[in-house]
Image (cartoon, coloured by chain):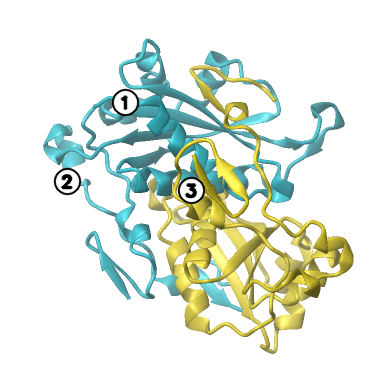
Chain colours: A yellow, B cyan
Amino acid sequence: MTKSNSRESQFSIDPIFLDRWSPRAFTGEVISESDLLTILDAAHWAPSASNQQPWRFIYALQGAADWDKFVGLLVESNQEWAKNASALIFVVSRDFNGDFSEGRKSYTHSFDAGAAWGHLAMQAKLSGFYAHGMGGIKHDQIRETFAIPEGYRVEAGVAVGRLADKSVLPERYREREFPSQRKPLSDVAFKGKFIAN
Amino acid sequence: MTKSNSRESQFSIDPIFLDRWSPRAFTGEVISESDLLTILDAAHWAPSASNQQPWRFIYALQGAADWDKFVGLLVESNQEWAKNASALIFVVSRDFNGDFSEGRKSYTHSFDAGAAWGHLAMQAKLSGFYAHGMGGIKHDQIRETFAIPEGYRVEAGVAVGRLADKSVLPERYREREFPSQRKPLSDVAFKGKFIAN
């Protein structure tokens, strides 16, 4: 058992997995580009099928000329808090292997990009930041804005920032500002069988 | 810059991201179920969209009655080395949110399951093991063997084991038994734009 961050794991896992969480209250402070690239560098050392590295990251830094444009590509409910992040990232995956003309579709591009996102979130924590993944993004507008061609999938957004007191949040978010719990491990890990749930 | 494990990152990332790699040479030693569940426990603390936790893990331990059955669900080229792992895992994702009858398809189930896999690989390393992901698995047979219904996607296999000398490998794998490199970060991380490559 490991206890940390108002969470408790059944087995003795490294505390970082409990300490990493997805807050919405960010300070809005500027991040250096090298701090952000450190986080993305760690992400891009993730494993992937045949080392294809299908992950791509499009980012903006707080205070930059394109910051408001990036914020506008989140759904409105995420804009409210993510505008105070230090960086915004859109994760894109390449859905084919080798040359596009060959048309060999990848089966694992989203899964592999997710592994990179998992590593991104860990390095963010190790660097003193928090990363909050967002499914709520404007996929079509992101594709259009950055001229992302066929063969690439817009996966998710990520807000990276320094933790602030939850008083900075709109009231409806304050009561949700705590580390989330997880299903019992026995609901997701099955020895020799599968249980649909 | 960080140097470790015959790898060098551009920025100063935590060495664990370089130390984690995907070997094929495993000792074949038995793993305790609690050691394996520690690795899966860490994985299941990964972030996911709306905390849906769409990851599922089906596992077998080296030496158990169903070990050969699990090995047989890998493509033949993976069977050659993965049979000497300490555990085999199939990662499955739930591709809908809420009740199945509601039919709300998840956009991020594979991506989220990938984040859990990224965390799995990290805890494996922290626990003294290595995890090797495998796209080369018999997806249809896995579905049939474990009666995995519609609404779930078979994502990938994972071999977890203790590192052995590469001399245990068939010759054609020995020359590939080293930590893989990565694309330059500038090929995958773009400031304010997207570059198809």
**10 Å crowding of disc 2: few (<14), some (14-19), many (20+):** few
Instruction: Specify whether A57 is left or right of B123.
Output: right
- Identity of the residue drawn at 71% across and 56% down: A178
Q: Earlier in the sequence, mark 3 or mark 2?
A: 3
Please count the marks in the image.
3
Query: Which quadrant of the structure image shows residue B78?
Result: top left
Q: Is residue B17 above or below residue A168?
A: above
Callout 3: SS: helix
Q: Is residue B39 visible?
A: yes
Q: Which residue is mark 1?
A: B79
Are callouts 3 and 2 both on one chain?
A: yes
Callout 2: SS: loop
Distance in Å between CA atoms under marks 1 and 3? 24 Å
Q: Earlier in the sequence, mark 2 or mark 1?
A: 1
Distance in Å between CA atoms under marks 2 and 1? 18 Å
- Mark 1 residue type: Gln
- Identity of the residue drawn at 32% across and 45% down: B22
Question: Which label was assigned to residue B175?
Answer: 2
Read off the chain for label 1.
B
Instruction: Specify whether B52 is left or right of B90.
Output: right
Q: Are marks 2 and 1 in contact (CB under 8 Å)?
A: no
Q: Position of residue B72 (x, y in %)?
A: 38, 18
Callout 1: SS: helix
Distance in Å between CA atoms under marks 3 and 2? 28 Å
- Mark 2 residue type: Glu
**10 Å crowding of disc 3: few (<14), some (14-19), many (20+):** many
Q: Position of residue B160 (x, y in %)?
A: 35, 35
Q: Which residue is mark 3?
A: B119
Q: Position of residue A96 (x, y in %)?
A: 53, 50
